[in-house]
Amino acid sequence: MIQSLRGMNDIIDSERFEYFIEVATKVARNYGFNYMETPLLEETALFKRSVGESSDIVGKEMYQFIDKGENDVCLRPEGTAGVVRAFIQNKFDKAGGNYKFFYHGPMFRYERPQKGRLREFHQFGVESFGEESVYEDATMIMMIADILNALGIGYRLKLNSLGDNNCMPQYRDTLVSFLEEHQEEICEDCVRRKGTNPIRVLDCKNDRCQSLYINAPKLLNCLCPTCGDDFDKLKSILISNNISFEVDTHLVRGLDYYSKTAFEFVSDNIGAQSAIAGGGRYDRLVEFLDGKATPAVGFAIGIERLLELIQMPEMKREGYYFGALDDEAVELVISLAQAKRKTDKATVLYRSKNLKTHLKNADKANAKFCAIIGENELKESKIWIKNLEEKTEQVIAITEI
Ligand code: HAM
């Protein structure tokens, strides 16, 4: 039997999935964002240049191949790079102004699968272009909070600032000096990171490294006045909007394009893979991908990690369930259902001739009305209808339905 690939799941719990998309879409629209869809397949160079060659995503996890036209392509590991490419390709950067997009769909990372970590997973993301103010960073965070609150999901918010071109290089040098002093004690990965992207050592999973980095120089102590003021402003907006957060100076994110604000929402109820959303500011990326310099900020939520946490609203009964107790009546119930579907939900069961089975199936279909035609009803052009909400029944003329 052919099975799905490792780390690639069928979404069977589709009610929760659809409900998530519905709620998140509504919130995104309330904040003035419009839907954008970009291809699943892009040139590999797009991710190398944006997510960064030193990141695990590009270095180890890409679904990359040469297509029949000899193009080096890969399945998107995340959504931001494609949206930025589309933003530039459609010349929105040259036109100027603010652009706000949301998207959702599958992302692909060749990771080691475990609970909450898949090779094909789904994200709901938003990207906001043209807004330099830290108020927009706060708005992103409030948007995620709105989505999670609407779904009844508790969270912890971790916040950091990664500085900008003024302060980051200096911090990086200080950190490298610290790492060199401890060269013998840090893990192999951190030795490599020291040469490629030193700040990534800060979220190393090795306990020995982590206990060492408690004493590493702190990024937040090295921010320039602009980044420092922005970070203070961000914290104060969140406080006045009742959003609690923890400052985490080791939060560096797994993608290289961030500057200034970086954040992650985590849940304590889903095991080791606890990040449910992440994002931040990426003011340099548009220019880096050959567009006109444009400030930008965004986030993505990992849908699969949330599914089990969603508190579903009580599903209201709706529409009709049609059944026949006699073969002769089947064609009639099919056409009645067909007519009903112009305005209502209507399902039909062709097989059964048993009222009890029909009632059970109508209940399972969450129908409001169970409408049945038997031999007698057929002769008299009538139909028996039970209102499953009010538990009342009546026989009416078929023309009345
Ligand atoms: P990310 O932190 O790599 O950010 O991914 C966002 C979320 O996707 C994570 O918090 C997690 O919930 C989910 N996720 C990531 N990898 C997996 C996986 N292997 N299995 C299941 N869920 C996963 C980004 O992708 C950025 N593009 C976010 C962003 C948008 N930044 C600015 N704009």
Image (cartoon, rainbow, N blue to C red):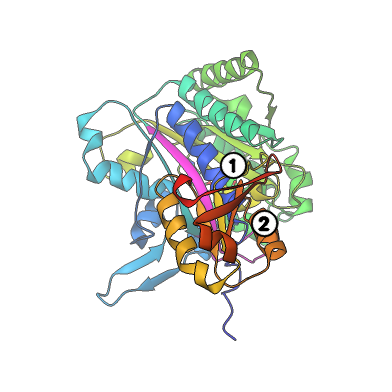
Circle 1 is placed at which residue position?
277
Q: Indicate whether 291 appears above or below 163.
A: below
Q: Is residue 35 visible?
A: yes
Circle 2 is placed at which residue position?
364
Q: Residue at x 53, y 23 (%)?
A: 138
Per the rendered image, the range of residues in magenta is 108-128
Give the image location of residue 213, x and y in percent. 72, 42
> Which element is circle 2 on?
helix
Q: Residue at x 71, y 49 (%)?
A: 182
**Left or right: 304 with respect to 207?**
left
Q: Nearer the viewer, mark 2 or mark 1?
A: 2
Task: Kindly indicate the quadrant of the structure image that contains residue 240.
Answer: top right
Task: Kindly indicate the quadrant of the structure image that contains residue 2.
Answer: bottom right
Q: Residue at x 56, y 74 (%)?
A: 5
Give the image location of residue 69, x and y in percent. 24, 75
Q: Indicate whether 70 appears above or below 51.
A: below
- Give the camera-side residue of 167 and 71: 71
Contact flag, marks 2 and 1 (Cβ < 8 Å)? no
| Dot 1 crowding, Cα within 10 Å, few <14, some 14–19, many 20+ | many
| Dot 2 crowding, Cα within 10 Å, few <14, some 14–19, many 20+ | few
> Which element is circle 1 on?
strand
Residue 87 falls within the magenta-colored stretch: no
- Give the camera-side residue of 217 and 248: 248
Among the two numbered marks 2 and 1 on one chain, the one whose residue lies closer to the N terminus: 1
Q: Quadrant of the N terminus?
A: bottom right
Report whether the residue tagged 1 is closer than 8 Å to ligand 1.
yes
